Image: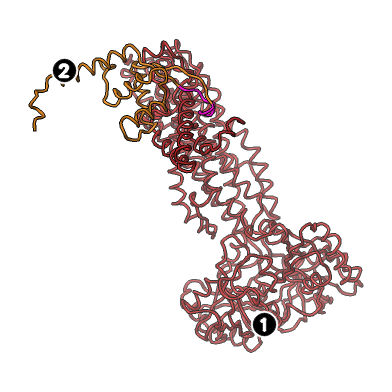
Amino acid sequence: MKGTQLGEFEEVVLLTIALLYDDAYGVAVVEELSQRLQRPMSLGVVHRTMQRLEEKGLVRSRFGEATAERGGRRKRMFSVTADGEQSLREARRIRDELWGGIPETAFGN
Amino acid sequence: MDSRKDKGPLPPCWAEWLIGRITAPHIREEVLGDLYELFQSRVRSHGSTKAGLFYVLEMLLLLHPRLWRSPAHSTQLSNQFTFDSPSNPTAMFSNYFKVALRKLSRHKSYTVINVVSLSLGIACAILIFTLVKYHLSFDHFHANEDRIYRIYTELHKEKVTYSTGVPNPMGEAFRSGYSVAEKVGRIAFVNKRVVSLSPEKKFEEDLAFADPEFLDIFDFPLIEGSSQTALQEPNTALITDRIAKKYFGNQDPIGQLLHIDESLVVRITGVLRNLPATTDFRSEIYLPFASLKDHSPWMVEKDWWLGYNKEMQCFVRLKPGVSADMVDSKILRDIADKHYDKEMAKQFHFKLQPLSDVHFNPKLRGYTEKKNLWTFALIGLFLVATACVNFINLATAQALGRAREIGVRKVLGSQRAALFWQFITETGIITALALLIALGLTYLALPFINNWFSIALIVNPLTDTYLLAFLLGILLIVIFCSGAYPGLILARFQPVLALKGKLSQRSVGGFSLRKGLVVGQFAISQLLIIGTLIVTNQLRYSQQADMGFQKDAMIILSVPNNQKAKTNSLAAQLSEMAGVENVTFFDSPPATETIGSTPIQFDSRPEAEKFNISLKSADHNYIPTFKISVLAGRNLNPSDTVREYVLNEAAVKALGLASTQEVIGKTATINNRKGTIVGVIKDFHFKSFRTTIEPLCLTTWGEVYNSCAVNVNTANLEPILAGFRKAWTATYPSSVFTYRFMDEDIERLYKLDNMLLRLIQAFAGIAIFVGCLGLYGLVSFMAAQKTKEIGVRKVLDATTTNILFSFGKEFLRLLLIAFVLAAPLAWWVMENWLNNFAYRIELGAGIFLLAILITFIVALITVGFRSVKASLANPIKSLRME
């Protein structure tokens, strides 16, 4: 199913959205990611990724409150959909399987 | 807004505006909000300058198609969100573009006809625009040009005559007596004088003697030398860069000496920048006005208010706020009253002519009337219109062929607007292509145009903003004029009818409109054809008619020095040569626009006559050489001073005498010199055909001869001219030998008309060609429509001629309607033009019949060519198609 195929960065962004839960919007995700990945993130990249996730139906969005620190503009709040959760679990399962399959001596040197 | 102000630094507003413009509406708010929030947090951590830079950086990183793309409709999303953004213009446009290109490459002949006719029309429009702009920009580059005026003279006698010149004390009187002008500059133009660097290096140049103020009034900047001292000292000179290069090559011209004729030696003190093409001041050597008295003392006779010379001019720059009317009615009137007695003050009127009028007032030697320019502009408009008409005709005719396509598109949800814009895109591509080709054509045609008009037009849309604007304007106008109507027709089709193929010519609507347009086209062509025929006829009439004297086989030489010894020796040498029949010396050839007139007092009548008489000074050989016939009395006797007069018939009539015999033996005082009238000559055209023959007298007056005419045997010209050069240079070693043929001189009287003629011919040709292209396209289309009809007719025994006739009669009718429209209009326009000529052809039916015949033949060939093909086609083929 092409729609649920997750790219690497998409997975990270999707996880961050899940992590931030009720406070997942553009700037929050950018800041969280910059901190965790320890490299500066541009709003553009994150924004495009979230748009793509939304098109794939992995997140959904709604408008939040307008605040003064945004110049009176509303946030777009993202939350992970069931499909999103499913594909995250799927990705994790594949990773776990991979980890599980690695022979102990593989990194042995 | 207030709450935002409290927040302190704000993101750069241009960046915010820009990103707001780019971003698609459905994500604009969040993107701007996110950027704003990031900016604020960076202000806290990095300071506002860096935050601003980061803002711009973030903005650049945001650039991606996703930013402006409208939302993709994923199936899940469409349930949750509805976006009201209707369509994506860029995507639609690329689709329009693609479809249009396909369409155009499929219908090649349609495309070619449209592109060719539009590009011809537009090319003419570009040329005409450039030409009109060129003339309108004459002397427009001077600062404060709206306050610059030339003082001119009106002499009110029986008739009013105009002169660009003023009496020579006028400048001084105006300058010293009144304070309305900032600057007053006198200038005397002295044309065709010999400038020599050494006895071997001689040139013929036009000179100007000017006050230093002249260069303050007009912007002719110096590139070398000081403008403070320019034209101040006597015997100095300013030359243009071009002349400097011509005379001295790369040497420094400053300080070099020039010999002007044999009377002046001047030192060059400055170099002027080369004259722009758009100025009527063509002199390239400027000398101080103070030196004029040493060069041509007769031009600056002291306090001589009674005479004026058209080359002695006076320019003023008025102070701001001073009205020209006031100067005319008060100050110039005052000057006239002060310097003339009561009688003369009634005759002399001085007035101001605005600088912008100088190029356009033929009465005051302006180049052309503005009217002529607008005529050209109108012709240009006609040509573009003809091309647009082609386009509309072909496009609406084709619309039927596209009915199925339109039907399918409509069924698939295409809206009227979309169909309309798609068609406009097609038009746009054709027009843009035509515009490029037109520019190419213009570049090719420009050298010829410049040659015809002896001007220097430049077409460069990159440097010329007006031209660029014109091109864009014409692009848009053509696209909408020719695209809108067919576009609307296409968009209006009923899909069901269209798909069933039940649309007929009638429901396409445009057939009567198309007829109207074809009529318009024919009318334009016929108008131009009639115009061409009439102008040609009139010019042939004026140039080939008997002017009353012999003009062929006459060579005119200039006579720089009219001392008796010199002219005698030249005459002797010339008449000895083989092939020379006659030699005569005079001040003006028989036909010339520039001839002075003067009061006449006849016999014992107490007062001067009410009319002025034109005066030609010539020796006793003049009448026999030019074969002017003497009606009564005899020719002039040889003399060098004014003793005898010969009048023309018009003069006798003006004197109120019934018979030519009555004047013989009487005395007359003409130009203050008394003489006896010894003969009467037949009237001859001593000006162009535009003016009636006025009173004229001939007399001997050796002092003023400046030319000589030689009647030669033209069979063997080369050796004769070589002999002339030798004899002439022996007599006048310090001058430059030049000669001209008199018939060419006469042609020059009609120079502007001849250019007009060539242009109208070219435009008429193009209009007809474009019209034919359209006609051809229309007939091809009709033939395609009628394939079946023709097939049926042929099966039912119609002959080819019958079928041809069925095609032809429709167009014949349109042509006749067009003629009915065009003929009266053409008659009116041309009657007006012909009224400029005192001796003119009459407008007969012949010309009009010829015009309709030409259009008819051209249309017949165009229509016939295609219809023959259609009617010869095998009916089986056309009927089998289903």
Which of pointers 1 and 2 indicates the residue nearer the eye?
A: 2
Contact flag, marks 1 and 2 (Cβ < 8 Å): no
Q: Position of residue B411 (x, y in %)?
A: 42, 13
Q: Residue at x 56, y 52 (%)?
A: B131
Can the viewer see residue B166 in this picture? yes
Q: Which hue is chain A drawn in?
A: orange
The quarter of the rendered structure image containing the C terminus of chain B is: top left
Q: Is residue B595 above or below residue B881?
A: below
* Quadrant in which residue B688 is drawn: bottom right
Q: Is residue B870 left or right of residue B539?
A: left
Q: How many marks?
A: 2
Marks 1 and 2 sit apart, C-alpha to C-alpha, by 108 Å
Can the viewer see residue B419 in this picture? no
Look at the image and say whether residue B289 sits in the magenta stretch. Answer: no
Subunit of label 2: A
Look at the image and say whether residue A69 sits in the magenta stretch. Answer: yes
* Quadrant in which residue A104 is drawn: top left
Q: Secondary structure at mark 1?
A: loop
The quarter of the rendered structure image containing the N terminus of chain B is: top right
Tell me the tag on residue B822: none
Subunit of label 1: B
What colouring style does the render use? by chain
Q: Amino acid at mark 2?
A: Glu
Q: Residue at x 87, y 72 (%)?
A: B339
Q: Which hue is chain B drawn in?
A: red
Tell me the tag on residue A97: 2
Which residue corresponds to mark 1?
A: B234
Range of magenta residues: A68-75
Q: Residue at x 19, y 18 (%)?
A: A94
